[in-house]
């Protein structure tokens, strides 16, 4: 069976004064989605951008947008990000008291629902939520900043979540996010990850389109 593997460049590492250039490079490189990291300065110690910028990105591309909400109480913003053109909206289990309700609302709006776990959150945080989300995102760094090193200890959790998805019969993408580069992507794939967010490994290079192709080649071999 061929496993579909997605490369999802994160705009966090792009030049924010030239998002159009970054989008064009991602398209040339054959990116599967564009990953948009929204940070609120509460859930994580950093602030990035909100729905207005996501809408501007959406207006420039036909690539699906995968919006990663690193915010407290994400339910406050779901409609805005849907209206901005998000295809996937991913919330953090640690950011809401009512993940079930928030995930249901994302689907009701017509988006795919994603559930993210921080590195220290155990995989059983998903136990009563299977079937409620369309993908799971495992942070392989502590969220808030690009350019950190992948935490190898999280790879066991990637394997556990991938096995749980198979056992339960939920064919959801298992997304890894943080420190994914040409050196780490194969280990993540070997542990069961099927979608790969990469910021600095794409936009921190001179040729982001080539970097995307290189990441894809590394997991297609
Ligand atoms: C980090 C973000 C990531 C970030 C990854 O908090 O969620 O999506 O862009 O950046 P790199 O690939 O540089 O680790
Ligand atoms: Zn992210």
Image (tube, rainbow, N blue to C red):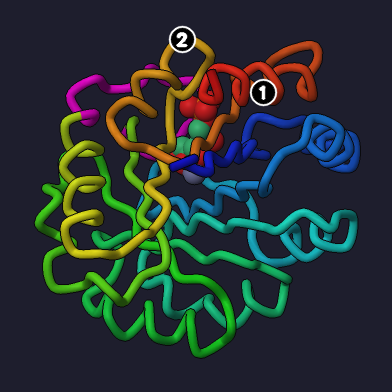
SS for dot 2 = loop
Residue at 52% across / 71% down in the picture? 112
Q: Which residue is mark 1?
A: 202
Is residue 72 in the magenta section? Answer: no
* Residue 147 magenta-highlighted: yes
Q: Nearer the viewer, residue 151 or 96?
A: 151
Residue 46 visible in the current orientation: no
Q: Which x, y percent locates residue 45?
A: 40, 42
Which residue lies at the image location 41% right of the left edge and 16% below the top edge? Answer: 184
Question: Dot 2: within a 10 Å radius of its alpha carbon, few (fewer than 14), some, or many (20 or more) residues?
Answer: few
Q: Quadrant of residue 215?
A: top right
Q: Point out residue 139 in the picture as x, y percentages from the top left corner.
A: 34, 40
Relative to 97, does residue 183 appear above or below in the rendering? above
Residue toward you, 135 or 5: 5
Taking the image as shown, residue 84 lies to the left or right of residue 166, namely right
Report if residue 47 is visible in the image: yes
Give the extent of the magenta segment.
142-155
Quadrant of the rendered image containing residue 125: bottom left
Question: How far is the residue under mark 2 from the one under mark 1?
Answer: 13 Å
Residue that carries the numbered disc 2 in the rendered image: 183
Specify which label sits upstream in the sequence, 2 or 1: 2
User: Does the Cβ of the disc 1 residue fall within 8 Å of ligand 1?
Assistant: yes
| x then y, percent, for residue 31 | 71, 39
């Amino acid at each position: 069976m061929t496993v579909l593997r997605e490369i999802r460049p994160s705009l966090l590492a792009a030049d924010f004064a030239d998002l159009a250039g970054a989008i064009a490079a991602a398209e040339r490189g054959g990116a599967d989605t564009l990953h948009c990291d929204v940070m609120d300065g509460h859930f994580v110690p950093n602030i990035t951008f909100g729905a207005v910028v996501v809408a501007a990105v959406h207006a420039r591309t036909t690539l699906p947008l995968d919006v990663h909400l690193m915010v407290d109480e994400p339910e406050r913003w779901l409609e805005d990000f849907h209206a901005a053109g998000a295809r996937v909206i991913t919330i953090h289990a640690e950011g809401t008291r009512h993940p079930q309700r928030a995930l249901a609302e994302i689907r009701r709006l017509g988006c795919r629902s994603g559930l993210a776990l921080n590195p220290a959150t155990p995989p059983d945080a998903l136990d009563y939520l299977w079937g409620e989300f369309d993908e799971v995102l495992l942070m392989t760094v502590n969220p808030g900043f690009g350019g950190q090193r992948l935490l190898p200890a999280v790879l066991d959790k990637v394997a556990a979540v991938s096995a749980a998805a198979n056992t339960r019969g939920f064919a959801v993408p298992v997304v890894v996010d943080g420190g994914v580069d040409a050196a780490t992507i194969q280990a993540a794939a070997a542990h069961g990850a099927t979608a790969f967010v990469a910021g600095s490994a794409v936009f921190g290079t001179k040729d982001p389109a080539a970097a995307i192709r290189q990441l894809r080649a590394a997991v297609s071999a």
